[in-house]
Image (cartoon, grey):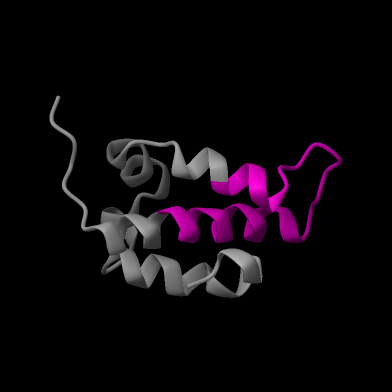
Amino acid sequence: MTQPQLSPLDRKYLVLGSVGYYFFLCHDDSQDDDMTPAEAYEEYSNMSNAELIHDSSVFDIFESCEDYYNSYESYIPAEYSL
């Protein structure tokens, strides 16, 4: 199957937005086994474009990859934000 095309910037928006979304979910109900920012960044960075698109549902819910990033930007650890 062919990889969906994402610009390098759109891919970065999805990776970082996914990190933010993860920490958004952890915000009110953190657990001892939650990923660290570095672990979350590594996990999402290692996903294929198709996995990132599927995991984020970006094109089903959001206008763009940038919109996805902007929605969770406040939860992205400072060392990983754009």
Badge count:
0
Task: From the top left corner, tell me how far across and down residue 13 is, in percent.
Answer: 38, 62
Q: Is residue 45 left or right of residue 9?
A: right
Quadrant assignment, res 23 = bottom right
Closer to the camera in the image, 50 or 80: 80
- The residue shown at (72%, 53%) is 26
Screen quadrant of the N terminus: top left
Q: Is residue 33 magenta?
A: yes
Q: Residue furthest left?
A: 2
Q: Is residue 13 left or right of residue 76?
A: left
Task: From the top left corner, tell me how far across and down residue 78 is, in percent.
Answer: 64, 71
Residue 42 shows up from this direction: yes
- The residue shown at (41%, 36%) is 47
| Span highlighted in magenta in the image | 15-41
Q: Is residue 35 magenta?
A: yes
Task: From the top left corner, tell me how far across and down residue 38 is, in percent.
Answer: 65, 48
Q: What secondary structure predominates along the stretch shown in magenta?
A: helix
Task: From the top left corner, tell me how far across and down residue 41 is, in percent.
Answer: 56, 49
- The residue shown at (13%, 31%) is 2
Q: Relative to 72, is 45 above or below?
A: above
Q: Is residue 17 left or right of residue 48?
A: right
Q: Residue furthest top?
A: 1
Closer to the camera in the image, 7 or 73: 7
Residue 76 shows up from this direction: no
- The residue shown at (18%, 35%) is 3
Q: Is residue 80 left or right of residue 62?
A: right
